[in-house]
Image (cartoon, grey):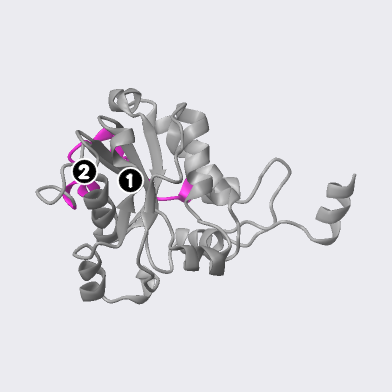
């Protein structure tokens, strides 16, 4: 009853097109859901996301659910997730992409889901890590535990979107991430997750830290990939 009254005075709108959501729709309308430009990376192991890391970091699988374009459909949706506390976006993307990832044999080989962490200062400023809801959703759907404390960020830096290309590529050369108790996770296959894959510099820096774990295997999944 209370929710019905709330919706009457403050109706929910789609984060993609700002139109009123119909009954049964939540966060993103059905039309926008079908208009999201999916990458179909899960159907092609040698995809463009995987090639960003090829020859740089030993990764077993890399994929993203959708393509991200500036001023495109996903921009306001991802912005709402990162800066407006709309964490249900991550939950939805996790549910959607999990249905595709379940088709892959390699998923059954993965032991842990690990999110790209925020520096404690950034976490305090924002109040939450926007990747966690995506990770929790994937964890529930894929039956793979989410470990938030394995990877830590030791250096505070500006938001990636505010850096130029040179600034982003410099990130991968810095030791800005570290692993807590690497021996404890020896031989594990880790699924590293993030929101948007751009140059891959942050994820590469994360992978370099994860390689401190003896005999580790690494795969990467993102909500979106900048194109």
Q: Earlier in the sequence, mark 1 or mark 2?
A: 1
Mark 1, residue position: 39
| Disc 1 packing (10 Å; few <14; some 14–19; many ≥20) | some
Task: Classify the position of the N terminus by image quarter.
Answer: top right
Judge whether residue 227 can be spotted in this image: no
The residue under the point 32% across, 75% down is: 163
Instruction: Tell me the distance, in whole angstroms, between the alpha carbons under discs 1 and 2.
Output: 9 Å
Q: Are marks 1 and 2 in contact (CB under 8 Å)?
A: yes
- Under circle 1, the secondary element is loop
* Mark drawn on residue 10: none
Camera-side residue of 9 and 152: 152
The residue under the point 62% across, 62% down is: 18
Mark 2, residue position: 47
Q: Is residue 65 left or right of residue 227?
A: right
Q: Which residues are magenta?
A: 34-52
Task: Classify the position of the C terminus by image quarter.
Answer: bottom left
Q: Let me know if residue 36 is in the magenta part.
A: yes
Where does the image place residue 67, in percent across and percent down from the top left?
Answer: 36, 53
| Disc 2 packing (10 Å; few <14; some 14–19; many ≥20) | some
Camera-side residue of 57 and 107: 57
Tell me how many marks there are.
2
Judge whether residue 63 can be spotted in this image: yes
Camera-side residue of 19 and 1: 1
Q: Is residue 103 left or right of residue 44?
A: right
Where does the image place residue 83, in percent across and percent down from the top left?
Answer: 55, 66
Examine the rendered structure and indicate whether residue 73 appears above or below residue 149: below
Quarter residue 181 falls in:
top left
């Amino acid at each position: 009853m209370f929710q019905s009254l709330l919706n009457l005075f403050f109706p929910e709108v789609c984060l993609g097109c700002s139109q009123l959501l119909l009954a049964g729709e939540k966060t993103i309308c059905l039309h926008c859901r079908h208009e999201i430009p999916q990458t179909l990376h899960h159907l092609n192991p040698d995809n463009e996301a995987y090639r960003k890391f090829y020859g740089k970091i030993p990764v077993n699988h890399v994929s993203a659910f959708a393509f991200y374009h500036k001023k495109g459909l996903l921009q306001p949706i991802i912005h709402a997730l990162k800066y407006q506390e709309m964490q249900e976006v991550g939950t939805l993307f996790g549910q959607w992409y999990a249905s595709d990832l379940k088709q892959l044999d390699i998923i059954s080989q993965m032991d842990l889901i690990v999110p790209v962490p925020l520096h404690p200062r950034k976490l305090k400023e924002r109040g939450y890590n926007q990747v966690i809801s995506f990770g929790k959703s994937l964890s529930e759907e894929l039956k793979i535990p989410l470990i938030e404390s394995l990877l830590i960020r030791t250096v505070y830096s500006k938001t990636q979107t505010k850096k130029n290309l040179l600034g982003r590529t410099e990130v991968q050369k810095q030791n800005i991430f570290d692993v807590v108790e690497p021996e404890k996770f020896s031989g594990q296959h880790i699924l590293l997750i993030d929101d948007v894959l751009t140059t891959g510099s942050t994820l590469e820096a994360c992978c370099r830290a994860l390689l401190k774990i003896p005999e580790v295997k690494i795969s990467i999944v993102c909500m979106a990939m900048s194109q």
